[in-house]
Image: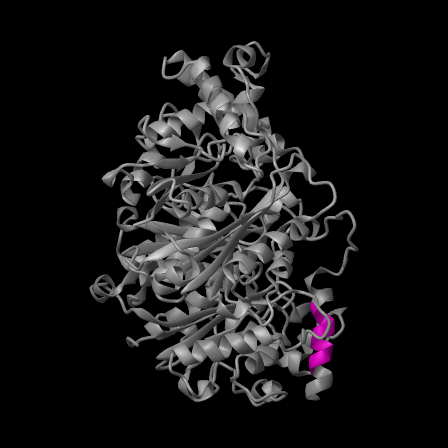
Amino acid sequence: MRDVAVVGFSQSPSMRREPNRNEVEILVPVITELKKNAGIANDQVDFVCSGSSDYLAGQAFAFVSSLDAVGAWPPVSESHVEMDGAWALYEAWVKMQMGYADIALVYGFGKPSMGDLPLTMALQLDPYTMMPLWPDAVSLAALQARVLLDGGHVTEREMAERAVRDRKHAKSNPFAQLKGDFEVEKLLAAPHLASPLRKHDCAPISDGASAILLAAGDKAKQLCKRPAWITGIAHILEPMELGVRDLTRSRSTEMAAQKAGVWRDKVDAAELSAPFTHQEILVERALGLSSKTHVNPSGGALAGNPMMAVGLSRIGEAAGQVWRGTADRAVAHATSGPCLQQNLVCVLEGK
Amino acid sequence: MAELCGVIGIGQTKYAASRKDVSMAGLLREAAERALADAECTWKDIDAVVIGKAPDMFEGVMMPELFLAEAIGGAYKPMLRVHTAGSVGGSTGIVAASLVQSGVHDRVLTVAFEKQSESNATWALSIALPFSVATVAGAGGYFAPLIRGYIRRSGAPEDTGIRVAVKDRQNALKNPYAHLQIEDISFDKVASSPMLWDPVRYLETCPSSDGACAMVMAREKIAERSPRKVAWVHATEMRSEPTFFSGRDQVMPRAILDNAKSLYKKARITNPRKELDCAEIYVPFSWFEPMWMEGMLIAERNEGWKMTYEGATALTGDFPVNMSGGVLSSNPIGASGLIRFAESALQVRGMAGAHQVDGAKKALGHAYGGGSQYFSTWIVSSEKP
């Protein structure tokens, strides 16, 4: 495989509601800053790939106008996935493996505040058998949490501990939305939002965008002092129907971790994009993380959850750990679909 | 280093205004199983799945590939969902090919679809958004001024579009999968059909279709052992540019010209008109045949209409275009680009049946989308590059 590294990362602050700017306006400073920091212009970028969802924007072809933020003139070689930007990064990585591109720009963006996100997510379900019941995303996650609690796989305390930990880590992250010092006891005293989930168990709803610059071989070394080399990246999809899946584990994360080679060496830091506390526990277990791994140094998805960018941001945050030398080896995770249906795992190394 | 990629299986559904006999899952399955049968492989042989479709609102399901995971054989496998406006079918094929060319996977299944009868495309394209002026033009209303711009520049005879429509609709009669099969098609029939968006008449317009198209692609060693003929991928290319800015040439966008130049360079083609045997081009409104003949540098600037007029693009001409009947005859939007790619592959495999171009060895597949701003293309051949 060709050596490809994350050499640049930029993001907007995660905000519950971005009142003044549309998606393109959120993206412009993010992409501009990324290119400026790396000192590159469009003509050095061989491939552009993005991730977003029309349903968040409430508009068909919503991603088209994001080309304005790229400044796609002269025309660029470009593609788009209707997925989190982490999968756009995967497509760009594939293009680099085939030798099509040496430098790639990847971005993801979402502005879910324009609609009712949990209900919008219900439109992701089987339109013939599930969607007519309008099960919202929080309620489906609550079903999974119930299975885990009743089976003795997790406790409500363990779940609250994840919220406390992530929000504490997020104190040092200027882009995070939920941050501060919280106490497990007080969180557990709060009422249920969708039993057994409380508000702290759910990731916030965030507007935001992020962008990553990938470079291959020597170009990566020129653009970055200590590139975060992608030594493994893989993603796996599970069936959607909850009844045919083992909800007490994340099998697709396990498979992706195996393929990405997570277990070949120690993991110093991990950035997870699980949107619910119990799912964060499942992902930690699926990745086989030990107590030696610094989990979610940025606060993870539970501290800031810009839809369609949150997974890509995890890769950017994990790369940041490598650039700064706080990790030699970091793992990033992205997810999509109800109850961790589809998962991507990316291993980054400083070498 | 890049691996060689070959198309070893192709499957299409019957295209129709409404495929009420199948669900979305059934529609995709129909195309995918035909592609697997053509490649003589099973679901187990597939390493990854790439799905393409146009806006999710066309069916009313957000990211439908998630609920379709099992129907497309994607359970416990990697799955990517591509969406690049109208060019998406082409882009989907390109992503699938790159998964093979990169050496990441051995055998990839790609499926693109649209089931327009599940929702309402006109509604999906007409949502009023805050702070923006709605075009309220539909695709035809959007593209008609660009066509008029082309006619003014080129001085093309006004019946050029009618001739394209008659030719594509005659071709569709030879393609059992085509949606519109108008037995008594004639110049007069097209000419007397209602004018929808001047100069585009009703019969010069694409239909709304349900349908899916699938391909199995494999790396060299596997493709070589494949039971049927292989369409080898010689080159793929994509280009995009923003929709609006002052000075943008929307009639002949730079993105298609750049795309064509880069594609031919990669495929080592210097004279596309001579070296290519035929092409499947994305022509949703008749006039886009001459326009994209010029955009793809097959015809000289302002002379694309001559190819139509002289019969060069007919099935019996020296450069047949849209032998399948094209988008004018079947338009499951998200699949339409992949159908162009698949039909070009069928030609070089010699498996296009009644609409086969004799001895076709090298063919072009082309798709475009957005406001004439997204382009994806490929060149396939019966011989390895």
Up-down relation of residue B51 to residue A155 (above or below)? below
Viewer-closest of A91 and B341: A91
The residue located at (43%, 50%) in the rendering is B80
Q: Position of residue B156 (x, y in %)?
A: 68, 87
Q: How many marks?
A: 0
Viewer-closest of A196 and B171: A196
Quarter of the figure with residue B224: bottom left
Confirm whether the magenta stretch covers residue A129. no
The residue located at (62%, 81%) in the rendering is B163
| Magenta stretch, overall SS | helix
Q: As drawn, is B208 to the left or to the right of B65?
A: right
Q: Position of residue A31 (x, y in %)?
A: 58, 55
Viewer-closest of B5 and A259: A259
Q: Position of residue A348 (x, y in %)?
A: 35, 46
Up-down relation of residue B247 to residue A103 (above or below)? below
Q: As drawn, is B9 to the left or to the right of B137?
A: left
Quarter of the figure with residue B275: bottom left
Q: As drawn, is B4 to the left or to the right of A301?
A: left
The residue located at (72%, 52%) in the rendering is B126
Viewer-closest of A230 and B62: A230
Q: Is residue A31 visible?
A: yes
Quarter containing the N terminus of chain B: bottom left
Which residues lie in the magenta part? B143-150
Confirm whether the magenta stretch covers residue B149. yes
Q: Position of residue A270 (x, y in %)?
A: 39, 36
Up-down relation of residue B271 to residue A74 (above or below)? below
Quarter containing the C terminus of chain B: bottom left
Quarter of the figure with residue B245: bottom right
The residue located at (58%, 26%) in the rendering is A133
